[in-house]
Image: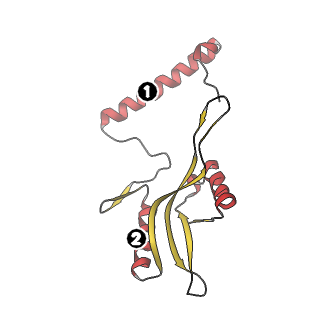
Amino acid sequence: MAAINITDLPPKYQAQALQQLQAQAKRKMETQAAGTPARPKYGNVKTGRAALHFDSKKEAARFDELMAMAAAGAIRDLRLQDAFTLQRSYITPEGQRVRAIKYVADFTYYRRAGDGDAWEFIVEDVKSKPTRTKEYLMKKKMMAERLGLTITEV
């Protein structure tokens, strides 16, 4: 999407755009002056566990569950924020660099498969309805198609 210059708009829309920009700036200044942080995009509350920080209470609670499962031996090799490259970066024939597409899972681990002897690799993401964005759904499909991995949503 190309950037739009306000001066290219008709006068009526220039005034409307300027009013909206001024209102945004005023809200930002009021928030900073009050010392209260801006409301998170999805209404989540950042939560900590010892030295770890999670984007939501739900994610922190799932971490607690997974740690209990690991202590019981039901899962192993628990990792947080494991990154997967879905498409490597490249340079176009015109010399423009295109960034890589990456997916960062909330948790990855191995759990016992149905027979109890083998271990299966699990990619897990803590999701709520607002966080199931178009971008996330596209990356979920790319994970399945390109890497053969299914994302488990909790």
Q: Position of residue 66 (x, y in %)?
A: 44, 73
- The residue lying toward the viewer, choosing from 86 and 54, is 86
Callout 2 amino acid: Asp
Q: Nearer the viewer, residue 91 or 41?
A: 91
Q: Residue at x 60, y 87 (%)?
A: 115
Q: Label 2 to label 1, Cα distance in Å?
A: 40 Å
Residue shown at the point (57%, 20%) measured from the top left:
16
Examine the image and state in which quarter residue 147 appears. Answer: bottom right
Q: Is there a contact, CB below 8 Å, between mark 2 and mark 1?
A: no
Residue at x 36%, y 31% (from the top left corner)? 30
Q: Which of the image's four quarters has the N terminus?
A: top right
Classify residue 65 by image quadrant. bottom left
Relative image position of residue 84 (x, y in whole percent) = 55, 56
The residue pinned by badge 2 equals 64
Secondary structure at numbered mark 1: helix
Residue 98 rendering spot, x and y as whole percentages: 60, 38
- In terms of image quadrants, where is residue 116? bottom right
Tag 1 residue: 25
Residue 130, given in percent of the width and then of the height, sits at 57, 52
Tell me the crowding category of disc 2: few under 14, some 14 to 19, or many 20 or more residues within 10 angstroms, Cα based.
few
Evaluate whether residue 154 shows in this view.
no
